């Protein structure tokens, strides 16, 4: 009977360890998800900046006479 109790206690100890490991992994996944979300925000900001740069280049080209587009079309692109 004592051997069975010892085995149950050992199994309970393993369960506690596995629960802690699962909690640590869940925290790690949450941390990873947050990092991915931040990277997504950074990429979105970079994309917006790139679009702004493209519009600025197009506006500059129109104003300097290098482009064939008209100013109204370029400015409309700024507000899309």
Image (cartoon, rainbow, N blue to C red):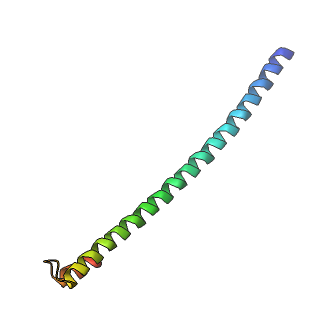
Who's the residue at 70% across and 39% down the image? 20
Residue 42, position in %: x, y? Answer: 46, 62
- Quadrant position of the N terminus in the picture: top right
**Left or right for 48, reference 68:** right
Residue 28, position in %: x, y? Answer: 60, 46
Who's the residue at 54% across and 55% down the image? 34
- Quadrant position of the C terminus in the picture: bottom left
Residue 7 appears in which quarter of the rendering?
Answer: top right
| Residue 34 is at least partly visible in this image | yes
**Left or right for 66, reference 80:** left
* Residue toward you, 6 or 38: 38
Residue 55, position in %: x, y? Answer: 28, 75
**Left or right for 80, reference 5:** left
- Considering every residue shown, the one lying at the far left of the view is 68
| Residue 80 is at least partly visible in this image | no
Residue 10 appears in which quarter of the rendering?
Answer: top right
Who's the residue at 66% across and 43% down the image? 23
Above-or-below relation of 21 to 57: above
* Residue toward you, 1 or 47: 47
* Residue toward you, 62 or 79: 62
Who's the residue at 36% across and 69% down the image? 48
Residue 4 appears in which quarter of the rendering?
Answer: top right
Residue 71, position in %: x, y? Answer: 19, 84
- Considering every residue shown, the one lying at the far right of the view is 2
Above-or-below relation of 22 to 80: above
Above-or-below relation of 10 to 68: above
**Left or right for 21, reference 36:** right
């Amino acid at each position: 009977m004592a051997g069975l109790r010892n085995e149950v206690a050992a199994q309970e100890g393993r369960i506690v360890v596995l629960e802690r490991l699962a909690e640590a992994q869940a925290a790690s996944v949450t941390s990873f998800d947050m990092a991915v979300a931040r990277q997504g925000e950074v990429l979105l900001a970079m994309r917006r900046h790139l679009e702004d740069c493209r519009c600025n280049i197009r506006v500059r080209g129109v104003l300097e006479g290098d482009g064939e587009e008209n100013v109204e079309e370029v400015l409309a692109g700024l507000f899309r």
